[in-house]
Image (cartoon, grey):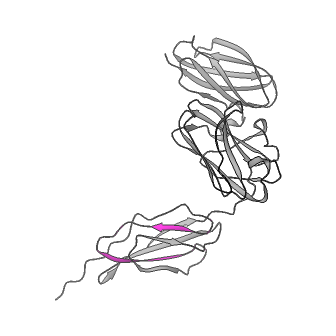
Amino acid sequence: ATPPPPPCGDPNGLSNTTPTQTSTTVSWSIVSGANNYDVDYKTSAVSTWTNAAAGTTSLSVNLTGLTTGTSYDWRVRANCTGSSSNYVQSNFTTATSVTCPGSYDVNSNDNTATAGTIPLSTDVYGLINVRGDNDYYKFVITAGGNITISLTTLPADYQLALLDNTGATLQSSTNSGTTSETINATVVSAPGIYYVRVYPKSNGAFNAVNCYTLRVQAGSASRMNPELVQLSGNNFFVFPNPTGFEANLAFKSKVNGNSVVTVINQLGSVVLRKSMAINEGDNLKKLDVSLLASGMYYIRIQNGSEMQTAKIVITK
């Protein structure tokens, strides 16, 4: 008698690309002995499957025409000579509708003083909705390195600039028309606050309906989490940490005023005290710690009734 065919192995390594609002590409690993594959998909809310590919020899299938912000299931099986594997299932959720403008593009973000802090590696949607409008955004880098800033989906001739913490332009991208703008920033060698400016060419271009997409992508640079820039109890950020000579203090204040910065050792003794002027909102101040011995300390910032504390390690 003819022996039965060997069993057909189940697919594994199921994955998908980051879904857009209407599509994604699903993929899987090769199955030994498989001739081809069947792929189905459906919304998670229903039980009926829709065939996306029957007998495909590819290891991926592009799913299109999907519904925005919807959970989907998909499954794949291998077809071998004389038998088929079990279906193996996975899932994904399509992207939600883009809100235009997004939450970071507010009426007051037309200069560095009122720029909102944006997260890195995240799409930010904004409008240049009147003639001469400029949009400013802020991000914080805790360790030097490379970043890539992109400005895409341009509805008009917009341009892009990277600014330092004083508002001076470090680098810009000024392509013509609706060509995307890109800045590969190798100049970010020092930690601190940086700004991105989106502006119309010659102050003339604008579109009050369609958003641009801004993204600051972290490369080898290290970012400060946005929540650490927002004043919340005893929460502020010290970098670099450990340090031997100088520390950067990044924090928010509710009011303008003169703050007292105190450094306390592990025995509770004050080893350094300094007064510095601070502003309402974001602050980035430098503190000389070169005279302190190696060890762990506490840095306390007090402005009236407002007090924040963080740890710092000194190494020599």
| Of 54 and 227, the residue lying toward us | 54
From the viewer's perspective, is residue 134 above or below residue 281?
A: below
Residue 86 seen: no
- Residue at (67, 53) in percent of width and height: 176
- Residue at (56, 79) in percent of width and height: 47
Where residue 20 sits: x, y (%)?
60, 64
| Of 314 and 44, the residue lying toward us | 314
- Residue at (57, 34) in percent of width and height: 187
Where residue 64 sits: x, y (%)?
57, 73
The magenta stretch spans residue 244: no
Where residue 72 sits: x, y (%)?
57, 70
**In terms of image quadrants, where is residue 116?**
top right
The magenta stretch spans residue 42: yes
- Residue at (59, 19) in percent of width and height: 246
| Of 116 and 159, the residue lying toward us | 159
- The magenta region covers 20-47
From the viewer's perspective, is residue 283 above or below residue 40?
A: above
Residue 9 seen: yes
From the viewer's perspective, is residue 51 above or below residue 74?
A: below
Where residue 165 sits: x, y (%)?
69, 31
**In terms of image quadrants, where is residue 301?**
top right
> Looking at the image, which residue sits at the far left?
1
